[in-house]
């Protein structure tokens, strides 16, 4: 763990601490430190207290049933996620409050009040019913960041259909895999989406993806119009706006869902080639999402909450849709990229909408640092009062830059550690209570019993590192992996019985603060996106020039980690710069742009141990220039072989 050790050294030299200002503390929703103790002593009572913030059609009769690793929360309760996110606000003073303020890439924008959003969701719910969608059916959603995306999620939730959102950057092949695995027969997509002035060809990908699947209906939102060529398949494809026009403008009754009925599937990369359909259920997920809005994000009715994630990832599910809306917030969502039309896109949005809370990823912050503060300086960011980060460890330099240049030294920063599987923020400061340290996600939120343990599952002493674990079930935990409960048990509970293993390494400092060090499995975190090394390796060997490949993540200044692929080619194949480009494009076609290898290194052989395990540490050291400097030296086929001998002694 050479690279982890040096990273840790830097982190542990970090001595700065930032206590909440008296002003912030006084107004915070959570400002009594006793909440931690109270929740630790009786997590169920704490979560039951939080669950009272939701609207229930029927009360639950038991808080938790734990047959490890299977949890049921709020047993026999009845509720509806869309009702909680939208409808319940329509009968209060929030009725005419902005729910979603949306900013499109070409400069178009829309504001939906809770009442307006509710009507759209009702209409869309009727439309889905008209198309034959029923409770429990899986609807695959492959849309750009346009209002129809949250409306689709909420319309599914309203009628009890299970949504499975696939990020618009995924390829046709990745989309197909997810449609097949989830066995879904309806897809919602768009003619295209805007990104950096270009059209993302969603409909074309969707057409290719549904071939050979059970998909019978494709609902197409018109977003880019003439900028894309859209072929509608007769009998299968229908336009969103035409179907919406046919749907009644009457309220659509919210389906009373059991607490444990599935709300959604969301696929995430694992250590094998096949992505896992993470299963989240209705009540527990909503309790986690809603609670963290009030605790970690200190949400107030006056707040304007801007989460820069895409709804295609869990961050968007929880902190654009279900969390903020269930808490009655105003959210800002945007289509496009942070540098188009200019590098001040975020700051322009913050200023235009008077954003109070900004939630973004360390990779974006590092990019802004690189661009320099001039893009920030000519915007008024005075409305900001709280900042958040998520997706990967944040280095102290980036934390400090965020603190100084965006927060102007005034806004607390909440570094939130969590995962698709955990549903909501797990390790994070409570901004009115916690003294923060740049680079540390600090401590588990109330009601979460996380720890750092050694390989025997024993808690490490402060000042030591090990596996991050969660020792007690929590409401928004995944319930299983769709269609593969064995994989669920093996992956998350196989190592330590009854204890959840997230797959991250962590260090616990002398104050018992957590410093997340990154993945300990074969998952790479590129700009906050999880990419399985196996997925990239399978994509590469699928190319007819490739014999074998090994993919590793090497540290990258901006992206956190970058995909580096070592490749051996088949007999008779000439390596060339053209082949490098072709292989990179092949990975993009197979998986999606986020998996594009940063570099491809041809080698005569892959270094393996005697038991045929690829020596990934050696490859990482090579890629990071620690053993031979410039990797072009690898043109000499004997290099890896001789390095292998050196390494096999200490592997
Ligand atoms: C990493 C995103 C350090 C971690 C919500 C985790 C983090 C994976 C942090 C989950 C953080 C997320 N500090 N690492 N604050 N947040 N991670 O499922 O490795 O897309 O396991 O969920 O991202 O990624 P996922």
Image: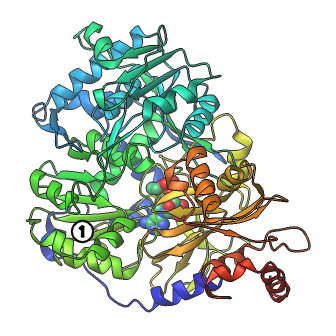
Q: Secondary structure at mark 1?
A: loop
Point out the image quarter for the N terminus: bottom right
497 to the left or right of 124: right
Q: Total marks drawn? A: 1
Q: Residue at x 83, y 59 (%)?
A: 572
Residue found at the far right of this picture: 610
Q: Position of residue 36 (x, y in %)?
A: 39, 66
Looking at the image, residue 647 sits to the left or right of residue 18; the answer is right
Q: Residue at x 88, y 67 (%)?
A: 612
Which of the pair 239/573 is nearer the observer? Answer: 573
Q: Is mark 1 within 8 Å of ligand 1?
A: no
Of 291 and 491, nearer the camera is 491
User: Would residue 591 be found to the left or right of residue 97 on screen?
Assistant: right
Label 1 CA crowd tier, 10 Å (few <14, some 14–19, many 20+) = many
Q: Position of residue 408 (x, y in %)?
A: 16, 76
* Residue 437 at least partly seen: no
Residue at x-position 74% and y-position 43%: 486
For the C terminus, the image quarter is: bottom right
From what the image shows, is residue 61 above or below residue 212?
A: below
Residue 396: x and y in percent read: 37, 81
Q: Which residue is mark 1?
A: 432
Q: In which quadrant of the rendered view does residue 650 lie?
A: bottom right
Image vertical order of residue 523 relative to residue 194, above or below = below
How does the figure colour the protein chain or chains? rainbow
Closer to the camera in the image, 50 or 285: 285
Residue 430 percent coordinates (x, y): 31, 66
Q: Is residue 561 above or below residue 72?
A: below
Q: Residue at x 24, y 45 (%)?
A: 105
From where the camera sits, is residue 633 visible?
Answer: yes
């Amino acid at each position: 763990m050479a690279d982890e050790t040096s990273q840790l050294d830097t982190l542990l030299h970090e001595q700065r601490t930032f206590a909440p200002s008296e002003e912030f503390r006084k107004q915070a929703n959570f400002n009594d430190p006793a909440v931690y103790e109270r929740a630790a002593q009786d997590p169920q009572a704490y979560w039951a207290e939080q669950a009272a913030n939701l609207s229930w059609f029927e009360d639950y009769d038991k808080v938790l049933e734990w047959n490890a690793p299977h949890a049921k929360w709020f047993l026999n309760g009845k509720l509806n996620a869309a009702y909680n996110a939208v409808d319940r606000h329509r009968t209060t003073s929030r009725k005419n409050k902005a729910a979603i303020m949306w900013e499109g890439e070409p400069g178009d924008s829309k504001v939906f009040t809770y009442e307006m959003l509710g009507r759209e969701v009702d209409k869309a719910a009727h439309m889905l019913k008209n198309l034959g969608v029923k409770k429990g059916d899986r609807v695959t959603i492959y849309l750009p960041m346009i209002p129809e995306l949250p409306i689709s999620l909420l319309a599914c939730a309203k009628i009890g259909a299970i949504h499975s959102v696939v990020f618009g950057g995924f390829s046709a092949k990745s989309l197909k895999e997810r449609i097949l695995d989830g066995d879904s027969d309806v897809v919602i997509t768009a003619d295209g989406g805007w990104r950096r002035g270009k059209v993302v060809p969603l409909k074309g990908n969707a057409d290719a993806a549904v071939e050979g699947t059970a998909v019978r209906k494709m609902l197409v939102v018109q977003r880019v119009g003439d900028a894309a060529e859209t072929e509608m398949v007769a009998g299968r494809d229908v336009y969103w706006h035409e179907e919406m026009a046919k749907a009644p403008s009457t309220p659509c009754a919210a389906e009373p869902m059991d607490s444990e009925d599935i709300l959604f599937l969301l696929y995430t990369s694992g250590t094998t080639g096949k992505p896992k359909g993470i299963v989240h259920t209705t009540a527990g997920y909503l309790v986690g999402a809603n609670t963290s809005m009030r605790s970690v994000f200190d949400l107030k009715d006056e707040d304007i909450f801007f989460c820069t994630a895409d709804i295609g990832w869990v961050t968007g599910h929880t902190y654009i849709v279900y969390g903020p809306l269930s808490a009655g917030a105003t959210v800002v969502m945007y289509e496009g990229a942070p540098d188009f039309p200019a590098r001040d896109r975020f700051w322009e949005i913050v200023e235009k909408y008077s954003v109070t809370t900004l939630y973004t990823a360390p990779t974006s912050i590092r990019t802004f640092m690189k661009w320099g503060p001039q893009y920030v300086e000519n915007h008024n960011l005075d409305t900001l009062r709280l900042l958040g980060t998520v997706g990967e460890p944040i280095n102290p330099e980036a934390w400090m830059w965020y603190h100084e240049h965006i927060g102007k030294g005034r806004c607390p920063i909440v570094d939130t550690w969590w995962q698709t599987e955990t549903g909501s923020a797990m390790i994070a400061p409570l901004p009115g209570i916690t003294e923060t340290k740049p680079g540390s996600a600090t401590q588990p939120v109330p009601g979460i019993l996380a720890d750092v343990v050694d390989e025997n599952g024993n808690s490490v002493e402060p000042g030591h590192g090990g596996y991050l674990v969660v020792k007690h079930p929590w409401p928004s935990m995944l319930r299983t992996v769709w269609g593969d409960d064995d994989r669920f048990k093996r992956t998350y509970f196989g190592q330590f019985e009854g204890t959840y293993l997230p797959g991250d390494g962590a260090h616990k400092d002398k104050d018992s603060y957590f410093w997340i060090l990154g993945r300990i499995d074969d998952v790479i975190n590129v700009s906050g996106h999880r990419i399985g090394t196996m997925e990239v390796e399978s994509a590469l060997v699928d190319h007819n020039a490739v014999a074998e490949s090994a993919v590793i993540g090497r540290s990258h200044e901006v992206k956190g980690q970058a995909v580096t692929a070592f490749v051996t080619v088949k007999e008779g194949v000439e390596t060339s710069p053209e082949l490098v480009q072709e292989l990179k494009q092949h990975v993009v076609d197979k998986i999606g742009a986020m998996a594009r290898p940063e570099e491809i290194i041809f080698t005569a052989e892959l270094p393996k141990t005697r038991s045929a395990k690829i020596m990934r540490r050696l490859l990482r050291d090579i890629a990071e220039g620690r053993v031979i400097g410039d990797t072009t030296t690898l043109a000499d086929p004997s290099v890896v072989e001789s390095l292998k001998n050196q390494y096999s002694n200490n592997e």
